[in-house]
Amino acid sequence: MIQLKKSYKYYNTGSRKAYVLSDISLDIAAGEFVSIMGPSGSGKSTLLHILGLLEEPNDGEYLFLGENVSHLTEKKRTELRRNQIGFVFQAYHLIDELTVYENIETPLLYKGLNSSERKSRVAELLDKFNIVGRKDLFPSQLSGGQQQLVGIARAIAGNPKVIFADEPTGNLHSEQATEIMELFKKLNEQEKVTIVQVTHSEHNATYGNRIIRLKDGLVVQ
Amino acid sequence: MLKYYFKIALRNLWLQKGFSAINIIGLAIGLACFIMIALYVTDELSYDRYNEKADRIYRINSDIRFGGTDLNMAVSADPMGATLKKDYPQVEDFTRLYASEGSKLFKRGTQFITEDRVTYADSNLFNVFTFPSLIGNTKTALNEPNTVVINETTAKKYFTTSENAMGKMMECKDDKTQLYKVTAVIKGIPKNSHFNFDFFLSMDNVEYEFGNFLSHNFHTYILLKAGTDYKAFNKNFIQVIDKYILPQAKQFMNIKSMEDFAKSGNKIEYSLIPLTAIHLHSERNVELSANGNIQYVYIFSAVAIFILLIACINFMNLSTARSAGRAKEVGIRKVLGTEKKSLIGQFLTESTITVFIALFIAVGITWLSLSWFNNLAGKAMQLSTLLKPQYMIFLATLPFVVGTLAGMYPAFFLSSFQPITVLKGKINAGFKKSTLRSSLVIFQFAASIILIIGTIIIYKQLNYIQTTKTGFNKDQLLVVDNASMKTSTAETFRNEVSKLAGVKASSFGGFLPVSNSSRNDQTFFTDAVMSDKNGFNMQVWRVDYNYIPTLGMEILSGRNFSEQYGSDSSALIINETLAKSLGPGDPIGKAIYNSDGPDKPTRAYTIIGVVKNFNFESLRKNVAPLCMRLGNNKWMSAYRVESGDIKSLLAKVEDKFKAMSPGMPFNYSFLDDSFDNMYREEQRVGKVALTFALLAVLIACLGLFGLATYMAEQRTKEIGVRKVLGATVPNIVTMLSKDFLKLVFIAFLIAAPIAWLAMHEWLKDFAFRTNIGWWIFIIAGVVAMSIALFTVSFQAIKAAIANPLKSLKAD
Ligand SMILES: Nc1ncnc2c1ncn2[C@@H]1O[C@H](COP(=O)(O)OP(=O)(O)OP(=O)(O)O)[C@@H](O)[C@H]1O
Ligand SMILES: [Mg+2]
């Protein structure tokens, strides 16, 4: 489902290129639950952004769902993001001005669902995540764990094929983290959603069925 | 999707209440100013256009130069209209007004009331102009002598209802008593007319030597047939002059031909002015009312556009500044797969809605303040004018235009970023120092400073007019109307009043150095053999022995009239302008000549004194040649009063008047008031300009305040860190204020020369004008800087004194 071949990413710092990722090749099949690990600054987030079509590699080839996406237009990439990909961030990145309900509804709006379809889908998710009672609250009125639940609900609202999660539990207590991990596991097993997560915790990494380790921009394992 | 945009837009407005309030209020005030000025300008442009035949009605103007004096008059000779109609088929009709007699007394019950707005009119006046009748047939109403058409207000005033007034007799008194029958009541002439009368008396009642082409006393309007080019028609006047005027002129003085007349530097010209151009483009002698000035229409249009721009810029600046705070939202939306166009749609909807809200508030503000503004501008504007299609279209498109302009920048700017760049928070830095925003702030303040400087200079000129040495002492001079008294009674009255404590000097004389008082223009000659080579026109004022001392005029050489000299009946006192034009040498003792008509004998007058020039027309004009001679008219008396209690003195004068002239109205004025009235237009312009200048500054400051708030907010974390590192409050305030002040200073550098040029141009209109002092610029600059500093530092100080830990923790 995801094939990254000999990819490089660098930033021009002053006169020379600073390589963040070099010669990365990856294969992730549909239905996998992959954890990416590595020390801070090793390029985990960058790799995830590339996989999620938020950034482009400087060199190499990227096949997403069997399609070469290396030179897609922004419009096409947006379309893929909208329909196939869900994102979960360490900082949750909910829209502060929208309620829980509206945050979850937003991707559906962009997908062009009509109002009754949106309603039933959001209701279903609220129910599933046990947050029906909080649907009218604003993000600032929620705890971190609750915000992340909303973030995940929002990520899967559009029925994506794959979820990219960048340290989804980085800001949470261990109990909350466990809850989120269980949720991912359930999604992966019951709904066959492919999940790629970045994590610093060995324990969390074990929820997945494979670990990719990065160091200084190289895959070490 | 649109519904969603709406929801989000309203949500954002609500969540950022303070910000939205500043944004919306600033824009609303700006729009309200714009709407009010637009109403004002529309009103000025609408004069006389309500007449159904407005585009075919023209007034005949006369321009005569004789002996070096120019007379540009709004009146022409009485036979002119009829002559044109007879000789030129293009002329469909003509009608005349004869308003030279001024105010008259009309009797209501036992009391007489002074009526100023009285004219004689040709019977076909109502065929040419559109003054709808309430009762009676205006087409025939003035056919007979001793008839009068009045307006509704007058009918109510004298007869309680219009119905009652019809067919009633009205007693009118000037030199003699005359009864007029009310034959029609009209609906009152709209306020946007270049003339406005309450009484139209039949032309048949005018006592005048009709048929004289050389006396110009009638306002004559002609109705041209559709499709006639009036400019081409003007050429016909050459024939008219040849055929009718020259023969009469030859009788009067020794003119051989028109060429000869012209060679001596003289001229007679007639021309048509379109009815609709009179109000804004005509400033002639004997206008029927003080007209407007196209210059002010331009000035106010410019002010309106300035204010609208300032307000819109504000709006754009605040919206863009705030949108930086929404970069995160944009980033998330993009991650979620939002297309660029729907982001753009969202921002545009938001700003358009905001403008709509502001527009509604603006209309509300206009509605509330229109009566105040009408008062200020001396107008009768109505909010319903806005319902005209051109306004509706304009007002409906405005929110889209302003909304798009304001929303465009954040919409396109933010949505063009890579989502991850936005999420990483990298674009905020770029947003803080936007050159576009800086230029907009500079523009706003430059416009405000121009308005401030302009206002100061207008006020300085007004002050100059009021305090300048006008050649006479206008303060505490009481003028009483004696027209209703017999000559002998008037004399007794004056003697009685002179005896009152507090009255220092008194004089008879209707010729006063303010407009709307008597004038008398005559032709004099420097030689006993009168020809067009040695003739010149001047004002001849009939005064009495006490006139010059009472008015506080100064005799430069020679002497005042004196009862000790029996020959003073043919003596003249001339003004400086005339003395100069008489050439070198002492004018005292020189003789000049005139005659009352073609077959009357020539009279010689001896100059006995020269009086210091005094302004008797608007200070826009230079002082024209003038002489005074002894006269015997008693219809006005003037008193120099020096009393601490003017009110009780005035009451005593009134008692005496009522006792000697029972049933007659006591009309009086103070010369300085009449003098101020001459500059009412300037005063209005001054007040209106001041108001809008202040509002412009206010709007600009609101914008600055919003920006400063935003900047401080954006930099809370930086400020916190700096404070932890040891920065003092003044350090922080300086850091935050410096950039803004720099912008205001640049704005000042741009505004100063522009304001100087514009106001220099405006002052050129005045023959007597104040100078534009450099201190005005300093004041305007300091004012703008202080206001800006005050506005910005308020926020800066607030940010600087906040507890640093708080802001750091919050992040
Ligand atoms: N715009 C940029 N310009 C220059 N260098 C960058 C830029 N963005 C990221 N980097 C560098 O790329 C490297 C990898 O960053 P990345 O965010 O992928 O690390 P990470 O593995 O996710 O670290 P962490 O565990 O701390 O989140 C870092 O050394 C960072 O400094
Ligand atoms: Mg990272």
Image (tube, grey):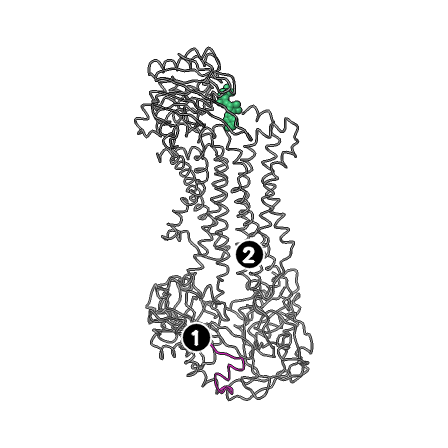
Expressed as whole percent of the image width and height from the top left, the position of residue B364 reads 44, 45
Q: Quadrant of residue B487?
A: bottom right
- Tell me: B284 left or right of B54: right
Q: Please check the rendered image and state whether residue B744 is part of the magenta-colored stretch, yes or no.
A: no
Q: Is residue B406 above or below residue B58?
A: above
- Picture quadrant of residue B14: top left
Closer to the camera in the image, B714 or B695: B714
Q: Position of residue B56 (x, y in %)?
A: 36, 68
**Quadrant in the rendering for residue B759:** bottom right
Q: Is residue B722 left or right of residue B17?
A: right
Q: Position of residue B406 (x, y in %)?
A: 45, 42
Chain identifier of the residue bearing label 1 in the image: B
**Magenta run includes residue B264:** yes
Q: Dot 2 corresponds to which residue?
A: B686
Q: Secondary structure at mark 1?
A: strand
Residue B303 x %, y %: 50, 53
Q: Circle 1 is placed at which residue position? A: B178
Q: Residue type at mark 1?
A: Gln
Q: Quadrant of the C terminus of chain B?
A: top right
Q: In this picture, which residue range is highlighted in magenta?
A: B251-269
Chain-order first, disc 2 or disc 1:
1
| Chain where mark 2 sits | B
Asked if one can make out residue B699 in the rendered structure from this viewpoint, the answer is: no
Evaluate whether residue B316 shows in this view.
yes
